[in-house]
Image (cartoon, coloured by chain):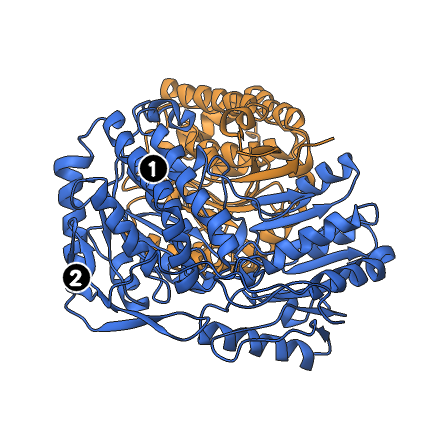
Chain colours: A blue, B orange
Amino acid sequence: MGSPFEYAPAPESRSIVDIKPSYGLFVNGEFVDGHGKSFKTISPATEEVLAEVAEADEADVDAAVKAARKAYDKVWSKMPGRERAKYLYRIARIIQERSRELAVLESLDNGKPIKESRDVDVPIVAAHFFYYAGWADKLAYAMPHSAGRGSDPQPLGVAAQVIPWNFPLLMLAWKIAPALACGNTVVLKPAETTPLTALLFAEICQQADLPPGVVNIVTGAGGTGQALVSHPGVDKVAFTGSTEVGKAIARAVAGTDKKVTLELGGKAANIVFDDAPLNQAVEGIVNGIFFNQGHVCCAGSRLLVQESVAEELLAKLKRRMSTLRVGDPLDKNTDIGAINSAEQLARIRELSDIGEAEGAGRWSPECELPQHGFWFPPTLFTGVSQAHRIAREEIFGPVLSVLTFRTPSEAVEKANNTPYGLSAGVWTEKGSRILSMANQLRAGVVWANTFNKFDPTSPFGGFKESGYGREGGRHGLEAYLR
Amino acid sequence: MNARIDVRKTYKLYIGGAFPRSESGHSYEVADSKGKFVANAALASRKDARDAVVAARKAFGGWSGRTAYNRAQILYRIAEVMEDRRPQFVQATQQSEGLSAAKADKVVDEAIDRLVWYAGWADKITQVVGNANPVAGPFFNLSTPEPTGVVAVLAPQESSLLGLVSVVAPAIVTGNTVVVVSSYDRPLPAVTFSEVLATSDVPGGVVNILTGSAATIGPWLASHMDVNAIDLTGIAGETALATDLEVAAADNLKRVRRAPAAEPDWTLDPGLEPMTAFLEIKTVWHPIGV
């Protein structure tokens, strides 16, 4: 099947971004040189070096935590909520003003399609700051939970926040906005492959005249993150990333008073019943697994389709997958961008090869991949059993495992047969079935007749080994208050 | 004339609605507050703990699937049956905690009243901690609390009845099932409580009570991959053990209710935290359209 549509290239101009040759750390309101080495951040679409970034060592992390503590003690925790709110509103506004710049930079550094960074990531980032800004002076109304603990909830102190590379700016917003609204100060470490939008955010904090030390950004890899979460001056740890690292963090904070929230991996079931509107379901499946190259912790990576419609659905799905355009992230027509790193590409390839070796049927549409950079075609596996590694392990790439079921109870059993519990999808026209499935699925987010929807007002987070705590909504405040 | 010889009770474990001895065949001596021998209690083993987890897991689907109203009635029923056996609880609390009759009476009052308080929460907690979310799009969006699953509870060492009720009731009222390790030195009120549970329409396996040592059984429960959460209240002040259990709990990311520095004052208003510690917020989305 060739591509039924031909498009002329429609690249978004990158002239709007001004990437410096090198970046320091953002500590106490200023960019400073780190004591450690530096590392290169590249465009995963071209492997072009975008900038050199400082790698924070323990002393740098310590300086950032001290700056955050000082800002907490002297300024931020004492500032009335309504004043804190205004800083957050300012930040939200500047994000809107500089939205195109942020979107282009995000797509360059991360590899995600510009239509996603422009239409999904950056608007939700602004909305997130806007939403939590409004909470800053209303915290006394936020927590019925605090009954017996006083109705005057207090911030925790300094928050250590470590975020992943799949939604660099969005995860920053999910972490920083509620923390600041509640009166905490933060030290945030962006992922080593995607530091640039966090550093641009630091400039936005400067433009907003945010008091020095309220937000500190330390760039680096795992060692920097480890130094940050285990720093004794930290009161709160918030992490989004792999379950493996999440467990290491849970061990590292054992025996301390640090409050922890973890948003980790997933292996979501996307369940399609025979009465579902199949064309809509196909769109939902595609959005569920190919959105953001499948680099989504809540991706619908296991398609559970009712046996009676499996053949019809798969035919439609394959036809739809053939129309997906893989390529230049800055091209406005691109549906699937670059895999974020060589390392991640290697993992996707390895697990896909294992899928084949274990006997599942592999299929990808014909698609031409660029010569340079990291690419993987949209892929599906049929004939997948629950024992297959591609049905159990998070691939974190554009790879869908297809399983079938006959009865609703079988669907529930298969969907819940995973140590994860982040999200799930249900497609059916029958309302009572939606609600029954939603009740039985052990997952923190259930999308019925939709998938991969996010909103600042809506709490997000997992059951079981997908982590604990919620981000977003009123529930997202709990992680930052006592 | 010969005095009548009383018939003494064998104090056993409570697992899956039955009262087995420890499969290990071990027991330990329990003394009253003055050090006088009272009875031999079953000394729960690793295998007993694992059996209890199996029973709790088996009971979880049914218990969490009951209506909140039904769970409320059952918790209230526990209070009713306790009230009915009040003299026995007063005696047991006096014996284990060395309280005066008046003080023991007050402890039993509090324990029964706490059950009544929690019973009422069954069909209210969702309204208080749940949320309708006004998302920026045409979607119905609702967040509701759901039980975490199987919760291991290390019950308080000092407060053998009120403390026990104060950690068990908040976990089960929301639909969790529990494996409880009782106070080591003061296990007998917990055994009597299990006899109340067995006659209060609480389905077997919802509450499992092991008498024995938190330091011995705790690590097995903390590292058990089919346990979803652990309450460390019972090892208050035992920093090293608490840290070890937290580390073990990380293997499957159990929700941990950390050990306090000292045993709490159980007469205070507990607040919602004992319940919310073992709840998961689930958010359901659906498009709105015609």
For residue A286, which quarter of the picture? bottom right
Viewer-side residue, A225 vs A211 = A211
Residue at screen point 20% across, 40% down: A210
* In this view, A321 is above or below A283: below
Taking the image as shown, residue A149 lies to the left or right of residue B153, namely left
Residue A146 appears anywhere in the view = yes
Report the residue marked by disc 2. A60
Question: How far across and down, in percent of the image, does residue A146 sit?
Answer: 37, 27
Q: Separation of disc 2 and disc 1 at Cα?
A: 30 Å
Q: Residue furthest front?
A: A8
Q: Name the residue type under label 1.
A: Arg
Left or right: residue A273 compared with residue B76: right
Can you tell which quarter of the image residue A231 is in?
bottom left
Determine which residue is flagged by label 1. A93
* Amino acid marked by disc 2: Asp
Q: Which mark is residue B70?
A: none
Q: Considering the numbered disc 2 on the image, is that residue within a helix, a strand or a loop?
A: helix
Along the viewing direction, whichever of A371 and B192 lies nearer the viewer:
A371
x and y percent of residue A241 in the render?
43, 59
Of A452 and A269, which appears nearest the observer?
A: A452
Residue A456 at x, y = what percent?
A: 46, 38
Q: Is residue B221 above or below residue B103?
A: below
Q: Residue furthest right?
A: A308
**The disc numbered 1 marks a residue on which chain?**
A
In this rendering, does residue B20 appear at all?
no
Counting other residues with Cα less than 10 Å from the Cα at mark 1, is it few (<14), some (14-19), or many (20 or more)? some
